[in-house]
Image (cartoon, rainbow, N blue to C red):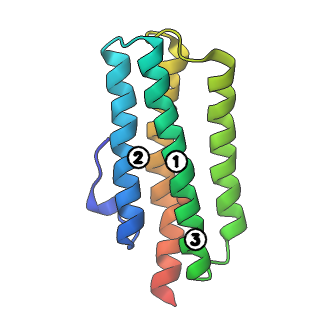
Amino acid sequence: MEWREKYSVGHSEMDDDHKQIFAMVDSFSASLLAGDGPDRLNTVFDELLNYMDVHFIHEVGHMKEIGYPDLFDHVTMHEKMVEKLRRLYDQHKLDDASSVVAEDMAEFLENWWYAHILTEDMSYKEFAESR
Ligand SMILES: [Fe+2]
């Protein structure tokens, strides 16, 4: 995934988190392409999921700090996404790098992150700038 200025949410800590997430999604995709075994794949994916949790906590802190009014809806979107991903993960685990599920997950993650930053995250940026 490629981070560009248009993905900046106007807060360096959030931007750094997002860059890190992009890199971790890339690691997961690279691991799939390399045909890594289940141990490695699951490790990479677990690290990504854990980091996303950490980031969402950071982001909630930031939204509270600026008094963002749509905090609840935003958090709900994070939760829905994580639930969907964890459900897929629990059902299938990553026992085969070439599995359609693993590829779907990588694609879902890429699309979700690009879209979420450009729409939902930009809303708190705009709010912060309008205060
Ligand atoms: Fe967000």
Q: Secondary structure at mark 3?
A: helix
Seen in the picture, residue 110 relative to 126 is either above or below; the reply is above
* Kind of residue sitting beneath label 3: Gly
Ligand 1 picture quarter: bottom right
Give the residue at mark 3: 61
Classed neighbour count for the residue bearing mark 1: other residues with Cα under 10 Å, few (<14), some (14–19), many (≥20): some
Residue 109 screen position, x and y as percent: 49, 37
Callout 1–callout 2 Cβ contact below 8 Å: yes
**Pick the front one: 123 or 36:** 36
- The amino acid type found where label 2 is placed reads Ile
The residue at which mark 1 appears reads as: 52
Instruction: Tell me which residue sits at (46%, 16%) in the image.
Output: 39
Q: Residues within 10 Å of mark 2 (few under 14, many from 20)?
A: many
Label 1 sits on a secondary structure element that is helix
C-alpha distance separating marks 1 and 3: 14 Å
Does the closest atom of ligand 1 sit within 8 Å of the Cβ of label 2? no
Tell me what residue is drawn at x 43 percent, y 38 percent.
Answer: 110
